[in-house]
Image (cartoon, rainbow, N blue to C red):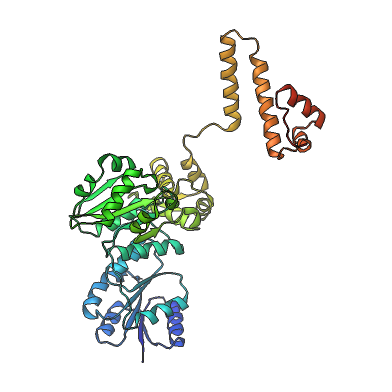
């Protein structure tokens, strides 16, 4: 059977490469750089499937997908784009695209997608386009998350969204809720409110979505009523969406996990997203609405090198702090480092010095003459204990770390009450 594919791409070299790869795979290929020509050819049934870029000059082809769907509801459309926001993937499926492919992609993957799409039983997916509040990226794990959210938006099944704190779990859940309709209520509750209000939350969210956050912290009574609601739903039971840490299986019964995770999405940590860290930072810089902010190559490298323990939320707050306190223009490592600075605890040396000062001041105020000896002995006892622990209890190695011989170590241990059966 002849399988005819039309390629819509305004980059001449990429259009040629895609066309040649599809031809070698056995497809009959035609190509164009014009959206109007593509729509016309599809309407005249000159192709069975369309592979289309999103940005074509000044035109966003996602805006034409509804038109194409009316003319050729039977024709699968594969959308490809170098844009890195979740809204691109979700917008593509909202308008009926069969699949979204972020550039760059593997040509073999495109061939496999078209093979599936042109089978009579090929699945279709759709979702609505919305701003995803920072869910941006090209990392494969993020693209998987985007597509999972798009498909789940068409359903009413319970959903479990996992990921590190600050990774955007609640933002993803709220997007899924918006697909229920503009009038559908959304009720949110953390562990404390879920315990306090209990099943009353189900009535409050009736006809909409109940978002229950931090499932790994649910007390037993919350676990019980949520499981009961999932096992015996009624016509008024709202859709349940839960967010949780990746280790949620260690905190909830398996029966509850399995019922919650009928739909499942995992948001990876930013440390697993490579260059997406800089893309996220640049995206948040652009969201300030003032314009004039760009991320220099050195700034991007600096952002990508950071651990970002606070996940996406920390990146967002750092970009916001920079916009609030910085000067628009190209942002480099120094500006970002200053924006990252905030209230921090004292380092170990400062904390130790502060503790010694407080101890001596209190002792002398009480009239003690032994304060200095007590502080020095406490510090020495801590040093000996730490050295022994680091040496695995071997005294010879511990003595070497402390700059003394084994006999001196033994005498000091005895004097400080540390002479135990530690290995020699």
Apparent side of residue 384 relative to residue 267 in the rendered image (left or right) = right
Q: Which of 12 and 68 is in front in this view?
A: 68
114 relative to 159, above or below: below
Residue at 47% of width from left, 42% of height from top?
340
Query: In the rendered picture of this protein, how many numbered marks are placed on residues?
Result: 0
Q: Position of residue 168 (x, y in %)?
A: 38, 52
60 relative to 304, above or below: below
Specify whether residue 264 is in view: yes
Q: In which quarter of the image is residue 265?
A: bottom left
Q: Where is residue 212 in the image (x, y as percent from the top left)?
A: 31, 49
Specify whether residue 292 is in view: no
Residue at 71% of width from left, 35% of height from top?
388
Residue closest to the far top? 367
Q: Nearer the viewer, residue 395 or 140?
A: 395
Q: In which quarter of the image is residue 366?
A: top right
Q: Where is residue 353 in the image (x, y as percent from the top left)?
A: 60, 24
Q: Which quadrant of the rendered structure holds the C terminus?
A: top right
Q: Which of 43 and 330 is in front in this view?
A: 43
Apparent side of residue 366 relative to residue 328 in the rendered image (left or right) = right
Q: In which quarter of the image is residue 279?
A: bottom left
25 relative to 402, above or below: below
Q: Position of residue 21 (x, y in %)?
A: 46, 83
């Amino acid at each position: 059977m002849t399988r005819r594919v039309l390629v819509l791409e305004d980059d001449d070299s990429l259009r040629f490469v895609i066309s040649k790869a599809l031809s070698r795979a056995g497809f009959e290929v035609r190509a164009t750089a014009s959206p109007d020509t593509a729509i016309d050819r599809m309407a005249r049934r000159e192709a069975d499937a369309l592979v289309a870029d999103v940005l074509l000059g000044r035109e966003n082809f996602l805006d034409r997908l509804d038109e194409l769907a009316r003319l050729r509801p039977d024709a699968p459309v594969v959308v490809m784009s170098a844009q890195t926001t979740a809204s691109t993937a979700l917008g593509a499926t909202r308008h009926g695209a069969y699949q979204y492919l972020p550039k760059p992609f593997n040509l073999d993957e495109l061939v496999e997608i078209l093979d599936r799409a042109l089978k009579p039983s090929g699945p279709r997916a759709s979702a609505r386009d919305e701003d995803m509040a920072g869910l941006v990226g090209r990392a494969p794990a993020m693209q998987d998350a985007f597509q999972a959210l798009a498909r789940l938006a068409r359903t009413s099944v319970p959903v479990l969204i996992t990921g590190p704190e600050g990774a955007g779990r609640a933002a993803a859940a709220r997007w899924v809720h918006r697909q229920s309709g503009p009038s559908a209520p959304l009720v949110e509750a953390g562990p404390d409110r879920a315990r306090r209000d209990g099943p009353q939350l189900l009535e409050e969210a009736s006809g909409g979505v109940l978002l229950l956050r931090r499932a790994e912290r649910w007390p037993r009574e919350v676990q019980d009523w949520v499981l009961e609601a999932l096992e015996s739903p009624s016509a008024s039971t709202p859709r349940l969406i839960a967010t949780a840490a990746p280790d949620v299986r260690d905190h909830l019964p398996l029966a509850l996990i399995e019922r919650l995770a009928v739909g499942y999405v995992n948001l990876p940590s930013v440390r697993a997203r490579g260059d997406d860290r800089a893309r996220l930072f640049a995206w948040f810089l652009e969201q300030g609405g003032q314009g004039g902010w760009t991320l220099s190559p050195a700034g991007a490298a600096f952002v990508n090198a950071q651990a970002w323990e606070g996940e996406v939320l920390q990146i967002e707050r750092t970009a916001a702090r920079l916009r609030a306190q910085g000067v628009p223009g190209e942002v480099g490592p120094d500006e970002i480092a200053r924006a990252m600075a905030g209230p921090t605890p004292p380092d170990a040396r400062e904390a130790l010095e502060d503790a010694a000062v407080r101890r001596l001041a209190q002792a002398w105020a009480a009239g003690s003459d032994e304060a200095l000896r007590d502080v020095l002995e406490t510090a020495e006892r801590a040093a000996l204990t730490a050295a022994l622990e680091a040496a695995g209890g071997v005294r010879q190695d511990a003595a070497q770390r402390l700059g003394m011989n084994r006999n001196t170590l033994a005498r000091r241990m005895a004097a400080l009450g540390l002479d135990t059966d530690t290995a020699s």
